[in-house]
């Protein structure tokens, strides 16, 4: 039997988890058994769409449903306690990024998973972007020699902190919400750990709108390989910007360079049907999510936003068949989650103290 899965948190991104597990159910690769959320009205809407059992208390869900695994899609600061409870209940875990907002918290989650012999995977889905995978393959072949420096940016339209989750944006930041993706990507590509961080940040735009959080964060990270990468992040792009997100990365090495526009994959649209303020040319990233209808008329989503979740389900199925944790093919692990959090945490320490931080 495929993995019996429960989703904890069915908000903006939890929807994507529900979609992934529903369609994995069509092909017998997972069972979307239940979901939990504190917001009972939202839960009811999701239940009407996806047909799973619904709980307002995730503890009750894990007591009642004989699950194999859960995915945690709650606000960042809540991942830690939920993950530890689920690990103690013997459940495999896919946790949204960041794993936790402190390195100590990440370590506690890793320890709880190890103690209970359960999988702890982090949804760093940028590792599943086919363009990024190809770059990793070429980097590993040594095509660009030793990487010396690089640059990454990730910027959201202002609607994300202003309209999507104003309730917890003040407990997050461009570094936690966006930077963490590219910190992890650089760590993975370079096969490195972070060594030192110096960061600067700005406030003003969002706080003037009543959302008390940083607008933008710039971090220069030196890795233990000697490479340095500058990460520019913000979530104040105008409502009229061509996409919900703008993102990309480039690395320069002794034998060459590699660049990726991680947003604009060449599809451009313009339509009178878009909301007034978003009219104009739009670029898209169909690599992340695209919708199709299958032969049976069912709505299916494809893209790395789904693949990374499906990868977790596949890992759980392998474990249920008897594969050992240390026999699984590489996946974004708790340790990877810790390493990315170490960088993000040091970014904030540097912002607070105005100095270079050693990780
Ligand atoms: N991988 C990605 O690209 C990506 C994209 C967006 C968000 N995220 C991550 O996903 C997580 C959720 O983000 P979001 O945008 O969906 O936030 P959201 O606020 O839209 O949804 C969070 C949901 O969790 C629920 N919740 C809170 N406490 C709970 C609890 N104790 N038990 C059950 N449910 C609880 C809330 O009611 C809410 O519905 C965050 O960690 C975020 O960083 C990841």
Image (spheres, grey):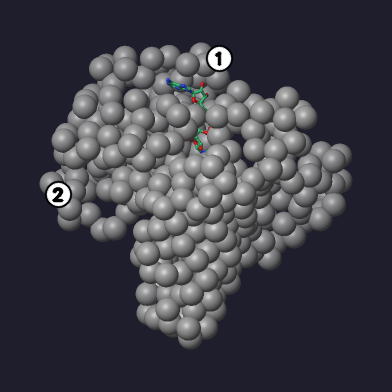
The percent coordinates of residue 45 (x first, y second) are 55, 20
Badge 2 is on which residue?
A: 324
SS at badge 1: helix
206 relative to 7 in the view: left or right: right
Which quadrant, please, contains the N terminus?
Answer: top left
Q: Which mark is residue 283?
A: none
The one of 79 and 67 positioned closer to us in this rendering? 79
Taking the spot 69% from the left edge, 28% from the top edge, the residue there is 211
- Residues at circles 2 and 1 in contact by the CB criterion of under 8 Å: no
Separation of disc 2 and disc 1 at Cα? Answer: 40 Å
- Seen in the picture, residue 177 relative to 253 is either above or below; the reply is above
Query: Which tag, 2 or 1, sits closer to the chain's start?
Result: 1
- How crowded pointer 1 is (Cα within 10 Å; few <14, some 14-19, many 20+) is rated as few
Residue most extreme to the bottom: 255
Quarter of the image where one finds residue 60? top left
**Mark in front: 2 vs 1:** 2
Taking the spot 62% from the left edge, 65% from the top edge, the residue there is 261
Taking the spot 46% from the left edge, 69% from the top edge, the residue there is 227
Quarter of the image where one finds residue 72? top left
The percent coordinates of residue 93 (x first, y second) are 31, 37
The one of 150 and 273 positioned closer to us in this rendering? 150
Badge 1 is on which residue?
A: 41
Quarter of the image where one finds residue 164? top right
Residue 130 shows up from this direction: no
């Amino acid at each position: 039997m495929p993995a019996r899965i429960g989703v904890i948190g069915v908000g903006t991104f939890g929807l994507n988890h529900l979609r992934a597990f529903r369609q994995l159910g069509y092909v017998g690769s997972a069972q979307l058994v239940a979901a939990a959320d504190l917001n009972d009205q939202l839960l009811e809407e999701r239940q009407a769409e996806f047909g799973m059992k619904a709980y307002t208390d995730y503890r009750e869900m894990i007591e009642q449903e004989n699950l194999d695994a859960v995915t945690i899609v709650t606000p960042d600061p809540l991942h830690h306690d939920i993950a530890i409870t689920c690990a103690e209940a013997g459940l495999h875990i896919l946790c949204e990024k960041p794993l936790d907002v402190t390195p100590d918290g990440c370590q506690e989650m890793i320890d709880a998973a190890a103690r209970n012999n359960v999988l702890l995977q982090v949804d760093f889905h940028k590792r599943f972007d086919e363009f990024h995978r190809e770059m990793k393959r070429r980097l590993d072949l040594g095509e660009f020699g030793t990487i010396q420096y690089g640059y990454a940016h990730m910027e959201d339209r202002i609607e994300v902190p202003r309209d999507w989750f104003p309730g917890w944006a003040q407990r997050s930041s461009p570094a936690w919400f966006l930077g963490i993706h590219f910190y992890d990507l650089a760590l993975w590509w370079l096969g490195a750990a972070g060594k030192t961080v110096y960061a600067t940040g700005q406030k003003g735009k969002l706080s003037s709108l009543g959302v008390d959080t940083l607008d933008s964060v710039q971090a220069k990270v030196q890795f233990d390989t000697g490479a340095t990468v500058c990460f520019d992040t913000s979530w104040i792009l105008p409502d009229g910007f061509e996409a919900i997100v703008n993102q990309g990365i480039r690395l320069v090495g002794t034998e060459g360079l590699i660049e990726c526009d991680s947003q604009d994959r060449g599809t451009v649209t313009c339509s009178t049907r878009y909301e007034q303020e978003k009219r104009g040319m739009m670029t898209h990233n169909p690599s992340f999510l695209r919708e199709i209808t299958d032969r049976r008329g069912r709505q299916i989503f494809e893209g790395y936003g789904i693949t990374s979740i499906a990868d977790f389900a596949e890992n759980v199925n392998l474990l249920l068949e008897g594969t050992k944790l240390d026999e699984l093919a590489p996946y974004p692990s708790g340790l990877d989650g810790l390493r990315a959090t170490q960088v993000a945490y040091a970014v904030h320490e540097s912002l607070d103290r105005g100095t270079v931080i050693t990780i």
